[in-house]
Image (spheres, rainbow, N blue to C red):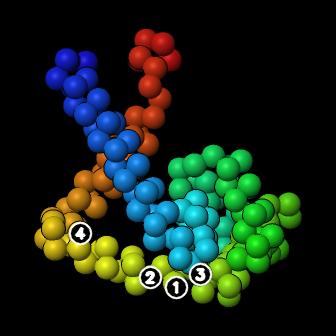
């Protein structure tokens, strides 16, 4: 690996860490009026279109199964989500939002839409779409090279 490649990796990682912090802070602000946290919103958001197992949510969101389990249990306790029988697996229940959970997410939509419009105005719609493509490409590339050991160590 060249020094330039190492620098690019470091700059990519630091930029991503900064973006993560920015998105978490913005998400907390958007979620607060709905009575959610960013983490709760993240987990409910993962199951809005289809119920998933805790492990499935963790894979989709790139977070640990244990943290998803803790949040899922809390959402169920708060009445924002519920566990449902999983026909594919007896023990791995599916998580799905309740109507109260869907209502909470709907309360976030105006702020979410306003932020999307401001970002589109700042980046341009085509620039915004390119940003999404680059981030998705980077994520796929990281999945492909996830084993960070040197080839001779494998």
Residue 26 location, quadrant = bottom left
Specify which label sits upstream in the sequence, 4 or 3. 3
Q: Is residue 125 left or right of residue 143?
A: left
Residue 119 disc label: 4
Is 145 located above or below residue 16 in the figure? Answer: above
Q: For the residues labelled 1 and 2, say whether their Cβ atoms are less than 8 Å apart.
A: yes
Q: Secondary structure at mark 4?
A: helix
- Which residue has dot 1 on it? 106
Whole-number angstrom distance, CA of label 1 to CA of label 2: 5 Å
Whole-number angstrom distance, CA of label 1 to CA of label 3: 5 Å
Q: Is residue 6 left or right of residue 150?
A: left
Q: Secondary structure at mark 3?
A: helix
Q: Nearer the viewer, residue 12 or 2?
A: 12
- Which residue has dot 3 on it? 104
Q: Is residue 140 left or right of residue 128?
A: right
Residue count near mark 3 (Cα–Cα under 10 Å), binned few <14, some 14–19, many ≥20: many
Q: For the residues labelled 4 and 3, say whether their Cβ atoms are less than 8 Å apart.
A: no
Is 147 located above or below residue 28 in the figure? Answer: above
Q: Residue visible at 33% across and 55% down? A: 136
Specify which label sits upstream in the sequence, 2 or 4. 2
Q: Nearer the viewer, residue 89 or 139?
A: 139
Find the residue positioned furthest to the right. Answer: 90
Give coordinates of residue 51: x percent, y percent: 66, 74
Whole-number angstrom distance, CA of label 2 to CA of label 4: 15 Å
Give coordinates of residue 44: x percent, y percent: 61, 71
Whole-number angstrom distance, CA of label 4 to CA of label 3: 23 Å
Whole-number angstrom distance, CA of label 1 to CA of label 4: 20 Å
Q: Residue visible at 45% across and 56% down? A: 24
Q: Residue visible at 20% across and 18% down? A: 2
Residue count near mark 4 (Cα–Cα under 10 Å), binned few <14, some 14–19, many ≥20: some
Residue 1 location, quadrant = top left
- Which residue has dot 2 on it? 109
């Amino acid at each position: 690996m060249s020094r330039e490649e190492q620098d690019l990796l470091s700059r990519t990682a630091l930029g991503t860490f900064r973006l993560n912090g920015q998105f978490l802070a913005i998400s907390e602000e958007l979620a607060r009026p709905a009575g959610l946290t960013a983490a709760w919103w993240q987990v409910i958001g993962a199951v809005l279109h289809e119920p998933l197992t805790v492990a499935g949510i963790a894979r989709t969101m790139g977070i640990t199964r244990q943290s998803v389990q803790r949040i899922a249990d809390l959402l169920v306790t708060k009445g924002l989500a519920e566990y449902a029988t999983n026909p594919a697996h007896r023990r791995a229940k599916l998580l799905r939002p309740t109507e109260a959970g869907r209502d909470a997410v709907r309360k976030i939509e105006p702020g979410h839409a306003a932020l999307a419009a401001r970002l589109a105005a700042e980046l341009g719609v085509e620039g915004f779409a390119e940003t999404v493509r680059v981030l998705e490409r980077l994520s796929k590339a990281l999945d492909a090279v996830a084993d960070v050991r040197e080839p001779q160590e494998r």
